[in-house]
Image (cartoon, rainbow, N blue to C red):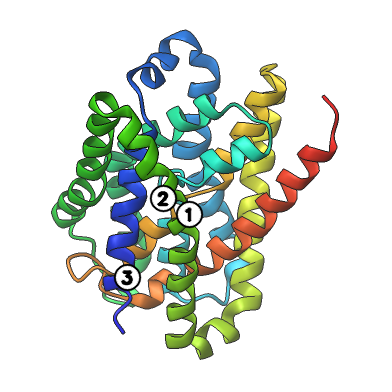
Amino acid sequence: MNAIFIVLPILTLLMFDLGLTLKPQDFLLIARRPKPVLIGMVGQIILLPLIAWLIILSPLTAELSPLFIIGIMLVACSPGGSSSNVFSMLAKGDVALSVTLTACSSILTLFTLPLIMAWVTASVGEATDIHLPIGNLLIQNIVLMVVPISVGFVVNIYREQTAAKIHNVLRRIAMPALVLLVTVFFVQHKQTIVAEFTSLGLTMTVLILATTGCGALLAWLLRLTTKERRTLVIEIGMQNAAQAITIACSPLIFNNEVIAIPAIIYALMMNLILLAYVGLTRTRVD
């Protein structure tokens, strides 16, 4: 089974679901509370790729193939995951801020992801003859992200109750769909994943802990509220693995499922670490 036929509808549904949760006032939050939004964007757009590249330059990734290096950077350049909104709610965070950050990162990475990944593939892609067709990437992201988000946004504006009902269904489907995707990938690439899990798992764990830790430190230094800090930890730590997998597997872009393996392992480690974080926050008394 070609994974692209699974991940394409999953990503489209996730983006449509994100649009269903958006309201015009979510974008007004940028003007009302610019500081947490700015910190969140700096964390996702700048800090994450920078830390990922520093990790790649470290001895930790010395034995990893160039395909995995491209996959790691692809995850780091992706926007925030839509599931972060649910995690923020469970962690008693700022859900409105979470929705705004996810939407903003989905828009900004339309431009930053192609630029960074073009540089990455030029730097390490020669050994694997991997090249990035930037035009195809832009078109695919517009079709699979901008369009479904916009449709969901319009539905929520004009049919709010209908949007709420659809959202309640889709949020229950999202996790089983992602589990199916991970299962298919594991079956198809079992030997590679098992062989590389120790090094890739450690790399992805370090990436998640380093970026969430830096985000939490930055939020604390700038004296954000507890809810805002919790949301930033989750937003910076939870990337859209489905988009990274789509770009890796797409026949129009990389057409290489091995590049998607870091995203699969990242999704696993991300959920384990952030579920532990949510559990910790719920035991604390503010």
Residue 80 at what x, y percent from top left?
A: 46, 43
Specify the quadrant that holds the N terminus: bottom left
Real-space CA distance between mark 1 and mark 2, rounded to the nearest whole angstrom: 5 Å
The one of 232 and 23 positioned closer to us in this rendering = 23
Residue 130 at what x, y percent from top left?
A: 27, 71
Q: Is residue 69 left or right of residue 224?
A: left
Q: Nearer the viewer, mark 3 or mark 2?
A: 2
Q: Residue at x 27, y 49 (%)?
A: 114
> Which amino acid lies under the numbered mark 2 shown in the image of this protein?
Val
Q: Which residue is mark 1?
A: 172
Specify the quadrant that holds the C terminus: top right
Count of all numbered marks drawn on residues in the image: 3
Q: Are marks 1 and 2 in contact (CB under 8 Å)?
A: yes
The secondary element bearing badge 2 is classed as: helix
Q: Which residue is mark 3?
A: 6
> Which amino acid lies under the numbered mark 3 shown in the image of this protein?
Ile
Residue 190 at what x, y percent from top left?
A: 51, 87
Q: Residue at x 61, y 35 (%)?
A: 89
> Which amino acid lies under the numbered mark 1 shown in the image of this protein?
Arg
The one of 29 and 65 positioned closer to us in this rendering = 29
The one of 113 and 40 positioned closer to us in this rendering = 40
Q: Are marks 3 and 2 in contact (CB under 8 Å)?
A: no
Q: Is residue 77 visible?
A: no
Real-space CA distance between mark 3 and mark 2, rounded to the nearest whole angstrom: 18 Å
Residue 243 position by quadrant? bottom left
Q: Residue at x 59, y 26 (%)?
A: 94
- Which residue is situated farthest in the top direction here? 32
Q: Height in image: 76 above or below 26? A: below
Q: Is residue 5 left or right of residue 57?
A: left
Q: Which residue is mark 2?
A: 169
The secondary element bearing badge 3 is classed as: helix
